Amino acid sequence: MAIPSPTSTTVAPDGADAYVPVNAPGLQSFVFALFFIFGGITSLNDVIIPKLKDLFTLSYAQAMLVQSAFFAAYFFISIPAAAIVQRLGYMRSAVVGLATMAIGCLLFIPASYSGMFATFLLALFVLASGITIVQVVANPLISMLGKPQTASSRLTFAQAFNSLGTTVFPYVGAILILGSLATVDPSSLSGAALDAFRQEETRVVVNTYIGLAVALALLGGAVWMNRHKLVETPAPSENILQALDLLKQPRFALGALCIFLYVGAEVAIGSIIVNYLMESSVLGMVEEEAGKHVALYWGGAMVGRFIGAALLRVFSPGKVLACAASVTIGLLLVSANTTGAVSGWSLLAIGLFNSIMFPTIFTLACEGLGKRTAEGSGVICVAIVGGAIVPLLMGFAADAVGLKMSLIVPAVCYAVIVCFGLYARRSRTAV
């Protein structure tokens, strides 16, 4: 794996080299920008799901295929993405990722003209492939920009910028996309009339993603112009599949499983928020207003990550993780067993406690990997495929027993995370 060539090298407590690319001024700001953009675009799925569900008259399970197509990219692209970083280095790989994201956004144009749900899924897969490459770059890079002991805090702080994107994008997306939902019932149309209706109604989605493509192209150009600011030494060519042998380490394997479950649970909850808040037994909101509340779910994660960055400097990351996951299970139980404002707001509050989970699980799993941290990032990014599977399971549950009872699916995921937090409460070095 290509790593930055440092002007100084510190030694981690476990004896592994901790590479600190001090020759790259402003690099943290660059990584924060990447977290912001891929977080924001990912959260737009929560807004387009109800849009496409309405236009194509989908069940909950079918609508969740949006997340399945998107997060499947992590399974298929993460290891190749790590190979790209190994060959091209961090900066050039980021440009490749941003360019792929822009292409995915532009694919929404033919998807709209086709009037077929499957073509939107293809566009989302390509878009997510670019995001996967960018994330494989960003996670290990921010971990290396400082002392190993504060990696959880630093990655949590970077994730706060990810949450800033997930807060801003859904709010604007709700206005642009859900605010235009038509009063015509698509199920009353057929043939050419239905195709024309879908083309017209998906135009707002297309315009939104064209704007994103332009922004991504500009950011990619800026990164390319500054690619020489980070001096990198290419690593020897290796079989990137060898990274999978990290799964032989119990702590890393359990951490990867928890990334799978956490991402799945977080995405599943975000995906049903709009429809959940529209339920008469919850808040009975209209689509646009419910869509704006998605920003509160992700905004809670943003606030929590700033708080968590401080807490993780004082308390054991494993204990903080176990406590946060336990509270989340409690909120799910409250939401499922109450009605009105209590039910709605307890679900939205989960975002606050989700805040520290991904970065904490990531750093606890990768603790002590040393030079293999980037390889570990590639494997963990494969585990993000949980976002493709858990929401689909929740969709089937929602179709079978209703949205409230389907909350048992993410609750089971968080229960496993509680166990991992307790298991990893002591540092690997101490053990």
Image (spheres, rainbow, N blue to C red):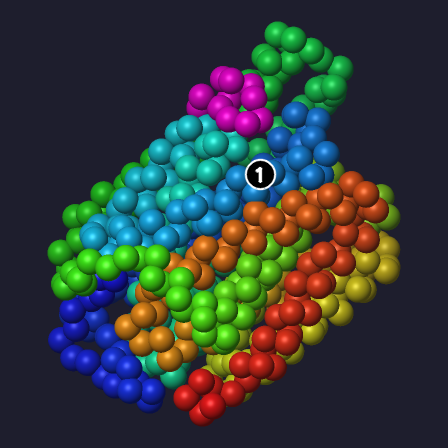
Residue 127, compared with residue 421, is above or below; it is above
What residue type is disc 1 on? Answer: Val
- Extreme residue in the top direction: 192
Q: Position of residue 361 (x, y in %)?
A: 51, 71
Quadrant in the rendering for residue 175: top right
**Element class at badge 1:** helix
Residue corresponding to mark 1 = 66
Left or right: where 212 falls relative to 251: left
Name which residue lies at 39% across and 52% down.
Answer: 78
Looking at the rendering, the stretch of residues picked out in magenta corresponds to: 109-119
Is residue 345 something one can see in this rendering? no
Q: Main secondary structure of the magenta part?
A: helix
Q: Residues within 10 Å of mark 1 (few under 14, many from 20)?
A: many
Q: Nearer the viewer, residue 419 or 227?
A: 419
Report the front residue among 32 and 140.
140
Percent of width and height locating residue 327:
70, 72
Q: Position of residue 243 (x, y in %)?
A: 36, 63
In the picture as drawn, the residue positioned furthest to the bottom comes out as 430
Q: Is residue 220 left or right of residue 323?
A: left
Residue occupying the point 59% across, 12% down: 196
Whether residue 117 appears in magenta in the rendering, the answer is: yes
Q: Nearer the viewer, residue 92 or 39?
A: 92
In the rendered structure, does residue 419 fall within the stretch colored magenta? no
Does residue 120 lie above or below 241 as drawn? Answer: above
